[in-house]
Image (tube, rainbow, N blue to C red):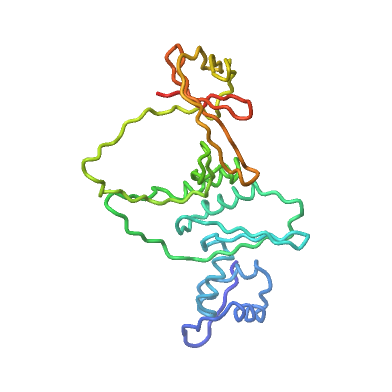
């Protein structure tokens, strides 16, 4: 049976009280445990103590949804771990929020025992954005965010995100940055009279294929790799490139374009006396 509160006299709307005031009043009533508090009648509790008491009762009965934003974990060595979850859009979907938390914690490792966990949630208004005629938004931002979180847990943060070219001439040099959904602008002011230039494309091998080269006075004569090989009938190169000579990431390589007797046109390079095939021209 629910414990009830009987209001005496004329019913008046109570002033909104703070949490500390409500706790003080509850203790005077003999309410000292969460079980005793949730057994109270919701409507009569609100009539006596105001809207804040109703919100406390709803949270205690798991009837209130709040956005999960911050998780704080305390370890036995007095250190505190904090993690802020960046949610694409405000939501009150409890299953979605706890899946995000579970995905993070199932890949979380600590060498110290956990003695306390604290959660903090703050409600915010839905984001609004004006899109252009040819722009669109994600159909389900939360599903994308959850998928990225699972991939990050499986592969690591350094392997999930958006590849960004580094400011270097080193081939295929890039870094991974956290994914951010941004709609790029469309260039409508393209100069008239300029037609697109069609060039030969390179079908690159990632990773590149290890190869052995037969040389004649430093001139490649025959190449052999896992899937590509043959006599070299024509070539261009070497094209010498290098970079980062000022730090420990320095590199240097010589690139060649080789035409084989079977008709393939391949790109390969030599670095530190090692030859590799980078790709085939289409």
Residue most extreme to the bottom: 9
Quarter residue 209 falls in = top right
Residue lying at 70% horizontally and 49% vertically, measured from the top left: 109
Residue most extreme to the front: 217
In this rendering, the answer to whether 172 lies above or below 180 is: above
In this rendering, the answer to whether 232 lies above or below 197 is: above
Q: Is residue 215 left or right of residue 112?
A: left
Residue lying at 56% horizontally and 53% vertically, measured from the top left: 98
Quarter residue 245 falls in = top right
Residue most extreme to the right: 77
Residue 173 position in % (x across, y down):
53, 40
Residue 257 position in % (x across, y down):
47, 24
Locate the N terminus by quadrant. bottom right
Q: Nearer the viewer, residue 168 or 164?
A: 168
In this rendering, the answer to whether 116 lies above or below 197 is: below
Q: Nearer the viewer, residue 220 or 124?
A: 220
Residue lying at 26% horizontally and 46% vertically, measured from the top left: 190
Residue lying at 35% horizontally and 59% vertically, measured from the top left: 129
Q: Nearer the viewer, residue 14 or 91?
A: 91
Residue 132 position in % (x across, y down):
29, 54
In this rendering, the answer to whether 83 lies above or below 251 is: below
Q: Is residue 217 left or right of residue 88?
A: right
Q: Nearer the viewer, residue 203 or 251?
A: 251
Locate the C terminus by quadrant. top left
């Amino acid at each position: 049976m629910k414990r009830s509160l009987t209001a005496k006299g004329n019913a008046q709307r109570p002033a909104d009280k703070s949490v500390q005031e409500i706790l003080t009043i509850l203790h005077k009533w003999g309410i000292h445990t969460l079980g005793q508090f949730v057994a109270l009648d919701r409507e009569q509790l609100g009539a006596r103590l105001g809207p804040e008491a109703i919100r406390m009762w709803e949270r205690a009965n798991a009837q209130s949804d709040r956005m999960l934003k911050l998780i704080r974990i305390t370890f036995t060595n007095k250190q505190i771990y904090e993690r802020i979850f960046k949610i694409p859009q405000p939501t009150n979907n409890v299953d979605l929020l706890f899946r995000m938390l579970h995905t993070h914690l199932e890949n979380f490792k600590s060498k110290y025992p956990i003695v306390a966990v604290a959660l903090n949630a703050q409600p915010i208004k839905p984001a609004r954005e004006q899109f252009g005629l040819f722009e669109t938004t994600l159909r389900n931002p939360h599903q994308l965010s959850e998928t990225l979180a699972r991939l990050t847990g499986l592969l690591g943060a350094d392997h999930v995100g958006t590849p960004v070219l580094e400011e270097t001439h080193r081939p295929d040099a890039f870094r991974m940055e956290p994914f951010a959904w941004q709609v790029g602008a469309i260039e409508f002011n393209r100069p008239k009279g300029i037609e697109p230039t069609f060039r030969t494309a390179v079908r690159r091998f990632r990773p590149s294929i290890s190869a052995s080269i037969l040389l004649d006075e430093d001139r490649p004569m025959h190449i052999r790799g896992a899937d590509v090989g043959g006599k070299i009938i024509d070539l261009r190169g070497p094209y010498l490139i290098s970079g980062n000579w000022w730090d420990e990431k320095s590199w240097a390589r010589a690139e060649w374009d080789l035409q084989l007797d079977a008709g393939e046109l391949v790109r390969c390079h030599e670095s530190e006396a090692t030859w590799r095939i980078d790709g085939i021209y289409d």
